[in-house]
Amino acid sequence: MKETVGNLKPMTMKFPFKIILLILCLGCQDRDETFIDPSLQGLVDSFVYEGAIRGKKINPTGFFIHFEEGLLQRTGGVGATIFNNKKQDQILFDLEYFNQYPDRLEWVFFHEGGHAWLGRDHAQQKLSVMNTTLQQDFDQYGEPFNREYFLDELFK
């Protein structure tokens, strides 16, 4: 028999458990959100499609995907994938750079998608979307490369 003091009943484990569960859920809530800049939605769809026709199921949720001013000046890169255990995971693209060179966005998007959704690291292989010098090679030699080759290599 449980003891009572006046009209008060002893607190059961149910109440503290519910509070702890609520705090844990609220703490994780923002990591599950997805935001895709509308101007990048077509690239997300293209990445999912290209993966699907190569047998990879891509789930592009859980990231904030957007342009950011000054990314190149701050990080030295025109794109970045940031995995953050305490805040929202992000895929960022330098706004000024891609306003100037919009034709380069697809390659950088697929490179960052390789990190985010395929778990790929930077590649030493010269002809790989995951090689950080690929854009420099395009700048120096033009872009005679076969898009299908690069996508096959990315999604292998």
Image (cartoon, rainbow, N blue to C red):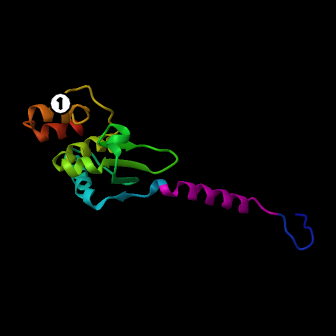
Q: Is residue 5 above or below residue 37?
A: below
Residue shown at 32% from the left, 42% from the top:
72
* Label 1: which secondary element: loop
From the image, tell me which residue sits under label 1: 127
Q: Where is residue 144, by image quadrant?
A: top left
Q: Nearer the viewer, residue 57 or 87?
A: 87
Can residue 95 be found in the magenta stretch?
A: no
For the C terminus, the image quarter is: top left
Q: Quadrant of residue 151?
A: top left
Q: What residue is drawn where x is 87% and y is 70%?
A: 8
Residue shown at the point (13%, 37%) measured from the top left: 149
Residue 50 sits above or below residue 18 on the image: above
> What residue range appears in magenta?
11-30
What type is the residue that disc 1 sits on?
A: Leu
Residue nearest the viewer, comparing 143 with 34 = 143
Q: What residue is rendered at 19% in x and 27% in y?
A: 126
The location of residue 65, given as percent across then percent down, is 34, 53
Dominant secondary structure of the residues highlighted in magenta in the image: helix
- Residue at the far left in the pictured view: 144
Residue 31 at x, y percent in the picture: 47, 53
| Residue 60 visible somewhere in the drawing | no
40 or 141: nearer the viewer: 141
Q: Quadrant of the N terminus?
A: bottom right
Residue furthest out toward the right: 6
Say above or below: 33 vs 119. Answer: below
Left or right placement of residue 43 versus residue 143 in this view: right
Q: Is residue 16 visible?
A: yes
Which x, y percent locates residue 14?
Answer: 72, 61
Residue 135 position in % (x across, y down): 19, 36
